[in-house]
């Protein structure tokens, strides 16, 4: 029996002193963590109190701070209900149409609802907190590996919430997509901003996380740069939806190039330069650690499994894709994440239509 089994679970609410909670506020119950995350903390905090009181106190204070931010977010009007605001009437439909209408190339932060911006700050702070839980659990010994891994999973899911927000904004702005898809993504974005929890994340995140983990275990041949063998190895480890995506979409040059950027960790432009250099020098293949030397510039082709690495490299690919679209350059104009979520949406819509037809 592990040490954790010797401790009685404690409700997380008991960690707050009564004075820390304003009983008169209707926003007292604003949620910071999901039920699954609260359950994990309820298991871990009593153990932490026994073994590491200083970290326990740090986490208690952090949780209280997050609760305060969550209460502030909750005070902003819901994005899903009708409100009479200083700027006029706001409804869910008006917000959705506004998101679809505005397609500025620049940063859209001033066009986004205040609740979305403040909620995003809460999500970032929560993500770092979950990561800290994971790190502390990892250093407490192998008997807590289950909690360490569980907290790590929750950290990654929170990071994917940030990532999916970007993906929704990208897809909503793509006027080549069916309008019903764009409205569906806009609604999903409002739900994400309202709760910072999304069913699509629960379904898509584990797939993308597995692909990311798999690419780290591979040794891509930076020679032909085609990534065929790497892609096959990754696909063998994935679920049916990913395999279906590969089968149906890898003939699309944009998807293929986005996949190569994901696999190799460098841009399409750098991939093309490296191909030319290696062909000219007659070198069949090189490793990740040699990419910077051959390109003559520092590139982070060998990112780790840290959630910050994943998000950082995603944003580089996202910004490159947006720049190509804006300047009408060759290469992928979406990220692999964009293409995959777009595919999942289309597949789900087709299933819904088939189910409706079958019931008719």
Image (tube, rainbow, N blue to C red):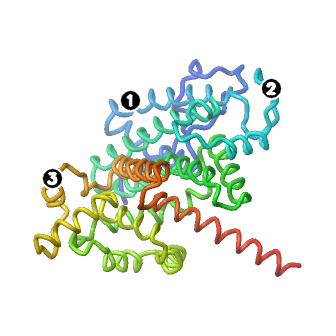
Structural distance between the alpha carbons of marks 2 and 1: 43 Å
Q: Choose the circle earlier in sequence order: 3 or 1.
A: 1
Up the image or down, 155 lies above or below 246; here it is: above
The quadrant of the rendering that contains the N terminus is bottom left
**Left or right placement of residue 315 versus residue 294 in this view:** right
How crowded is the residue under tag 3: few (<14 C-alpha within 10 Å), some, or many (20+)?
few
Q: Which residue is mark 1?
A: 58
Residue shown at the point (15%, 52%) measured from the top left? 296
In the picture as drawn, the residue positioned furthest to the front comes out as 328
Q: Secondary structure at mark 2?
A: strand
Which is more foreground, mark 2 or mark 3?
A: 3
Which is more foreground, mark 2 or mark 1?
A: 2
**Left or right placement of residue 334 versus residue 278 in this view:** right
Q: Secondary structure at mark 3?
A: loop
Give residue 169's mark: none
**Left or right placement of residue 264 versus residue 338 in this view:** left
How crowded is the residue under tag 2: few (<14 C-alpha within 10 Å), some, or many (20+)?
few
Q: Which residue is mark 3?
A: 296
For the image shown, how many numbered marks are present on the structure?
3
Q: Nearer the viewer, residue 222 or 304?
A: 222
Please state the horizontal and vertical placement of residue 335, each as a whole percent of the image: 46, 58
Q: Which residue is mark 2?
A: 88
In the picture as drawn, the residue positioned furthest to the right comes out as 360
Please state the horizontal and vertical placement of residue 194, each as a whole percent of the image: 66, 40
Residue shown at the point (49%, 58%) measured from the top left? 334
**Left or right placement of residue 265 versus residue 323 in this view:** left
Up the image or down, 89 lies above or below 217; here it is: above
Q: Choose the circle earlier in sequence order: 2 or 1.
A: 1
């Amino acid at each position: 029996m592990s040490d954790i089994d010797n401790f009685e679970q404690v409700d997380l609410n008991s960690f707050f002193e009564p004075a820390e909670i304003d009983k008169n506020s209707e926003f007292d119950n604003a949620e910071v963590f999901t039920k699954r995350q609260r359950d994990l903390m309820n298991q871990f905090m009593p153990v932490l109190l026994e073994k590491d009181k200083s970290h326990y106190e740090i986490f208690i204070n952090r949780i209280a701070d997050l609760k305060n931010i969550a209460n502030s977010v909750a005070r902003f009007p819901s994005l899903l209900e009708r409100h009479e605001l200083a700027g006029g009437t706001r409804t869910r439909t008006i917000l959705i149409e506004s998101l679809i209408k505005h397609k500025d190339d620049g940063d859209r932060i001033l066009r986004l609802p205040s609740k979305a911006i403040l909620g995003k700050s809460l999500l970032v702070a929560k993500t770092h907190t979950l990561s800290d839980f994971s790190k502390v659990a990892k250093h407490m010994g192998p008997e807590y590996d289950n909690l360490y891994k569980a907290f790590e999973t929750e950290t990654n899911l929170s990071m994917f919430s940030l990532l999916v927000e970007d993906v929704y904004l990208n897809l909503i702005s793509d006027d080549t997509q069916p309008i019903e898809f764009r409205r569906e993504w806009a609604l999903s974005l409002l739900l994400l901003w309202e709760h910072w929890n999304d069913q699509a994340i629960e379904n898509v995140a584990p797939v993308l996380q597995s692909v990311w983990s798999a690419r780290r275990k591979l040794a891509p041949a930076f020679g032909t740069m085609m990534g065929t063998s790497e892609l096959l190895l990754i696909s063998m480890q994935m679920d049916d939806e990913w395999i279906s995506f590969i089968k149906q979409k890898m003939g699309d040059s944009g998807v293929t190039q986005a996949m190569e950027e994901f696999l190799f960790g460098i841009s399409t432009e750098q991939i093309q330069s490296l191909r030319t250099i290696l062909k000219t020098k007659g070198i069949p293949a090189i490793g990740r650690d040699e990419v910077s030397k051959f390109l003559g510039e520092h590139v982070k082709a060998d990112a780790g499994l840290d959630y910050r690495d994943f998000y950082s490299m995603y944003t580089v690919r996202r910004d490159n894709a947006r720049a190509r679209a804006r300047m009408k350059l060759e290469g992928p104009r979406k990220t692999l994440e964009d293409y995959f979520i777009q595919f999942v949406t289309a597949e789900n819509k087709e299933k819904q239509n088939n189910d409706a037809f079958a019931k008719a």
